[in-house]
Image (cartoon, helix red, strand yellow):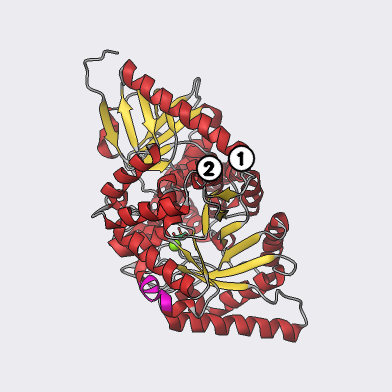
Amino acid sequence: MSNSTPVQVIRGIGASPGIVTGPVFRYEVRKIVVERRQIEDGPAELARLEAALEQARHEVHALFEQAKQDVGDAEAAVFEAHEMFLSDPDLLLLVHTAIQEQHTDAAYAWQTGTGEYADQLRSIGDEYLAARAADIEDVAQRVLRILQGIGETRAKLLEPVVIVAPDLAPSDTMLFDKAKVLAFCTELGGPTSHVAILSKALGIPAITGLGEAVSQLRSGMHVIVDGNMGEILVNPDQQTLNRYQQQADRQAQSYQEARAAAHQPAVTLDGTRVEVVANIGSPENAKEALEYGAEGVGLLRTEFLFMEREAAPSEEEQLAVYQAILTTMGTRPVVTRTLDIGGDKPAPYIKVPEEMNPFLGVRGIRLTLQHSEVGQSQLRALLRAGVGHTLKIMFPMVATSEEVQAIRQQIQLAQETLTAQGLPFAQNCEIGIMVEVPSAAIMADALAGQVDFFSIGTNDLTQYTLAIDRTNAGVASMADALHPAVLRLIRMVIEAAHAQGKWVGVCGELAGDVLAVPVLLGLGLDEFSASHRLVPLIKQAIRRYSVAESRQIATMALSLPNAAQVRQYLRGVAHS
Ligand code: PEP
Ligand code: MG
């Protein structure tokens, strides 16, 4: 290491925060490709295939259990899908026919069958189905490996390393010994890719979308990974290392202090108490939320109950899960969002026509209003689970007041059905909407009279306001919710709601960004809802400002011309 060589910086998307330093471990799974062999004994080959499939089912099930334990049901669901592919009757028919009728060996028949299946899904041109094609390829390689007699490529990590890979399938991510993973860095992927979601849940820094520059990184090279900024510093000199190490130490120290005070309320310097709650996606998350000092749940994403399965969950199944979460939270508020799928994330049992622009299509509330049987069973389950708790129900992707009227009718219908059935249900639960479509923000004064609260979904609000697809790695890094256009919409929403005595939360990622805290406080935000590990930090940041000072900071931020300048300004504020 010398002080004279300039430190090279590779930039990507900060997908999970934190600073670490250590050696690179290049992880590339070599793809198994087999040649066709002619076989004589069809039944024996079929038996060989079945044995390999059975072993694969065992392996995948073990990964599912491990993922459930490490990161929760929602993230583990992908392995359930893998298990389903291993028993998919259409796929197996294709492979069996090749073995029996064309006397093809099991490995080649499996490779061809799964390849055709994945190609078919890709040709539809839908991002969600393309991701499922990648899942099929993942599971296809597992079976080929077993058929070839190759042991599981469990990457043996001998020391703590920074994993660098082209992309990481969920099964790759789960294979590593997490105690030895300092960070995950991938060439591909956006802020919502699997590795980003898993890393956040595990508290491991991650950078995605680094592009071709990662090919310069070799195993053993020393790097600094700054997950906050989305930067890798290659072969840093001692001075840079010291600087980052100090920064990492300061952050670790500050986080410890934040955790020590996590169970205290978040009160500004001039005495305003602000609610800090958590975003959760499973019953396990609810327990973690409490450990990290969350005062309730600001966003329960219910999709985990509906995705990666062949039929919708029954009302009773939903009831049990909602009750488990509400029981964990006692009488703390639990803002539950109704099903937010469709478009880019369809459930196989809900038919949505093929769409050119899934994010502008039949998503969220549009889908549940079209499929009211799904919406009704969820509403009934929620209302029943809410008895004795502080349940609040929230609807995603609302764009118009007609939709709010339709929602009101749906709630009334669910209440009437439950009354007719003689089932007890929560009587006075608050009803709110997510504000994540610009029309809802602009019309907030009209919508405020129809609801009890707003929760601003800055992830989608940013994507729709700036016309940046949040899943597209080519543009996703520009989707910064601190853009003044988004902040001005947030101001409109809060002013409109407060004028009518309604409360406003933010449940998009912006609520977990400590830099944004004084701006949101200054705009008068009532509730911050962030990923559980960030709750202590947000509370800590709130305690550093007065509302009066925050108002000035917000006014300044909203007057700046772009997100970069807002970030720069807020960094200055945070360090002053
Ligand atoms: C949002 O859009 O900000 C949000 C919280 O919802 P999701 O990320 O689930 O779309
Ligand atoms: Mg959203």
Residue 483 percent coordinates (x, y): 31, 55
Residue sitting at the far top: 2
Q: Position of residue 370 (x, y in %)?
A: 48, 80
- For the record, the magenta segment spans 439-445
Tell me if 52 is positioned left or right of 167 in this view. right
**Is the magenta region chiefly helix, strand or loop?**
helix
Name the residue at 55% across, 74% down: 452
Q: Amino acid at mark 1?
A: Ala
Secondary structure state at the residue bearing disc 1: loop
Identify the residue shown where x is 40% and y is 56%: 551
Please state, as top left, top right, bottom left or bottom right, where the C terminus lies in the image. Answer: top left
Q: Is mark 1 within 8 Å of ligand 1?
A: no
In the displayed structure, would residue 339 be above or below residue 568? below
Q: Earlier in the sequence, mark 1 or mark 2?
A: 1
* Circle 2: residue type: Gln
* Residue ID for mark 2: 540
268 vs 452: above or below: above
Q: Kindly indicate the quadrant of the structure image that contains residue 468.
A: bottom left
In the image shown, does 76 or 119 lie closer to the viewer?
A: 76
Residue assigned mark 1: 261
Q: Are marks 1 and 2 in contact (CB under 8 Å)?
A: yes
- Any part of residue 152 in sight: no
Q: Report whether the residue tagged 2 is closer than 8 Å to ligand 1.
A: no
* Quarter of the image where ligand 2 sits: bottom left
The answer to whether 252 appears left or right of 332 in the picture is: left
Residue 384 x %, y %: 71, 72
Structural distance between the alpha carbons of marks 1 and 2: 8 Å
Numbered disc 2: secondary structure: helix
522 to 252, vertically: above or below: below
Quarter residue 306 falls in: bottom right
Instruction: Examine the structure image and report whether residue 444 is included in the region drawn in magenta.
Output: yes
Q: Where residue 376 sits: x, y (%)?
A: 60, 77
